[in-house]
Image (spheres, helix red, strand yellow):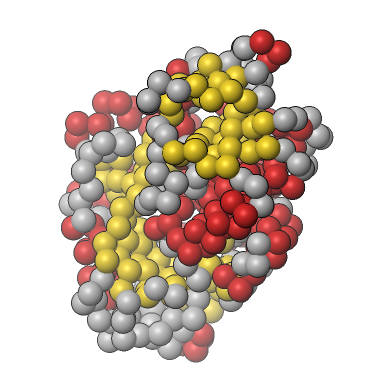
């Protein structure tokens, strides 16, 4: 394989470039702003290998009206975007059926059980091992009823080989003394990790790949022209240029669906916008990522400060961000972290690429074999990037897949 173009300079695109370069492939990454803001930069930093449960858990739809009723709650749908969201929501509802739920859980587990096998060598090869903090994560609850409601999910995770330790409120505070007395239950998952700073990780990885021969082309991709002589493809840029290649990998995050549809491949992909506030001097100390189960937000200690993030907003790719959501998350965290100082926080919003079944799209286009998809990871882009890059590299080079790729095929939306 001579030359492969990867569309997207986020963590999935760079991880794909890493694996291809190791195989001796000439790789060009194309991005309109390779060093600019991305979901890869502003996420909560979790390596969430324990997250094998799809978003459409049985019964979740009954909670949606209450979430939507809160103007700054964990879920929002912009009214103007609601009609376009209907097909996605219908498929989301179907993903919550018991048979689908179990199938999706198994498919997520198949990816996540490989994460450290692929991530640790990648970090070591680029001298980034110190960026990973393997300290586990703590999920906390206020009410025993909420803890009991989640018992099925924790049991399912255990059946997937995930270590789960249940804690009393006092035991949770022994692990994280900054937590308030309102916490009555906790669950510790030692296999979870977090990175010191997602932006630093992506920046250093990009620089290391450039030193190893990666070419980065600045430009906005407007189209892909497959089926050229000898099976080659070409990537069209906004300035009128066409870049030829032997294969193309689409790893453009929430924008990937636009390119797939132009190629005739139907996909249900939405921007699930997430929000956070990063506080450089928070006045409290956490050792690991803490997930506040009932309030649907997290707090992660990063080298740049305490990042408090969450929310899911569906409004398309072009609606302006509502940073009141970032500010609301910081105020909410004050209830559970007494002494938290929120002054000087930096607000952020980013587009998570969300599929209705919580599974990424990984695999070749059924219409155009020279095009390979690698997008739709939702909240798990950082977690699954290294494994996705390994799988995509094997697809491009004709190697046998390490996992069954059928659950992630784009054809499931046709």
x and y percentages locating residue 289 in the rendered image: 47, 71
Left or right: 45, with 163 as reference point: left
- Residue 392's quadrant in the figure? top right
Residue furthest to the right in view is 400
Instruction: Out of 220 and 296, give the one closest to the viewer.
Output: 220
- Vertical position of residue 263 compared to residue 409: above or below: above
Q: How many marks?
A: 0
Q: Which is nearer the eye, 299 or 174?
A: 299
Going 57% across and 26% down the picture, which residue do you hit? 410
- Residue 3: horizontal and vertical position, in percent? 67, 31
Residue at image coords 60%, 28% = 248
Residue 233 visible to the viewer: yes
Residue drawn at 40 percent across, 21 percent down? 240
Q: Give 145 or 410, whichever is nearer the viewer.
A: 410
Residue 219 image point, x, y percent: 42, 34
Where on the picture, by quarter, is residue 361?
top right
Residue 140 image position (x, y, % from top left): 44, 72
Which residue: 19% across, 35% down? 79
Q: Does residue 55 sit above or below 89 in this rendering?
A: below
The N terminus appears in which quarter of the rendering?
Answer: top right
Q: Is residue 411 visible?
A: no
For this view, does 307 lie left or right of residue 205?
A: left
Give above or below for 350 relative to 81. below
């Amino acid at each position: 394989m001579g030359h492969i173009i990867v569309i997207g300079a986020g963590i999935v695109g760079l991880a794909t470039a890493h694996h291809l370069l190791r195989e001796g492939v000439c790789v060009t990454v194309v991005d309109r702003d390779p060093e600019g803001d991305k979901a890869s930069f502003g996420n909560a930093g979790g390596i969430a290998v324990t997250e094998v449960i799809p978003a459409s858990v049985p019964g979740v739809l009954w909670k949606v009206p209450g979430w939507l009723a809160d103007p700054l709650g964990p879920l929002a749908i912009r009214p103007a975007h609601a009609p376009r969201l209907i097909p996605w929501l219908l498929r989301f509802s179907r993903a919550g059926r018991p048979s689908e739920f179990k199938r999706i859980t198994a498919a997520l587990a198949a990816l996540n059980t490989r994460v450290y096998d692929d991530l640790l060598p990648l970090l070591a090869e680029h001298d980034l091992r110190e960026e990973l903090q393997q300290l586990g994560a703590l999920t906390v609850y206020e009410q025993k009823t909420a803890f009991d409601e989640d018992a099925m999910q924790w049991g399912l995770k255990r059946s997937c080989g995930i270590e789960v330790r249940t804690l009393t409120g006092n035991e949770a505070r022994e692990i994280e003394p900054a937590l308030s007395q309102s916490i009555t239950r906790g669950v510790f998952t030692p296999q979870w990790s977090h990175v010191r700073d997602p932006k630093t990780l992506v920046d250093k990885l990009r620089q290391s790949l450039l030193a190893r021969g990666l070419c980065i082309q600045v430009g906005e991709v407007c189209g892909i022209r497959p089926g050229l002589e000898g099976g080659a493809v070409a990537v069209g840029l906004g300035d009128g240029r066409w870049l030829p290649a032997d294969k193309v990998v689409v790893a453009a995050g929430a924008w990937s669906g636009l390119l797939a549809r132009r190629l005739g491949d139907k996909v249900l992909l939405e921007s699930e916008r997430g929000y956070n506030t990063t506080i450089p001097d928070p006045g409290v100390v956490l050792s690991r990522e803490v997930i506040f189960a009932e309030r649907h937000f997290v707090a992660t200690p990063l080298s740049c400060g305490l990042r408090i993030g969450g929310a899911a907003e569906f409004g398309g790719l072009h609606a302006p961000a509502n940073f009141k959501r970032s500010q609301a998350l910081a105020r909410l965290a004050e209830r559970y972290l007494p002494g938290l100082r929120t002054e000087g926080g930096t607000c952020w919003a980013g587009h998570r690429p969300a599929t209705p079944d919580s599974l990424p799209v990984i695999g070749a286009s059924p219409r155009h074999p020279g095009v390979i998809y690698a997008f739709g990871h939702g909240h798990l882009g950082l977690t699954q990037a290294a494994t996705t890059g390994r799988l995509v590299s094997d697809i491009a080079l004709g190697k046998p897949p390490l996992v069954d790729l059928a659950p992630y095929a784009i054809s499931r939306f046709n």
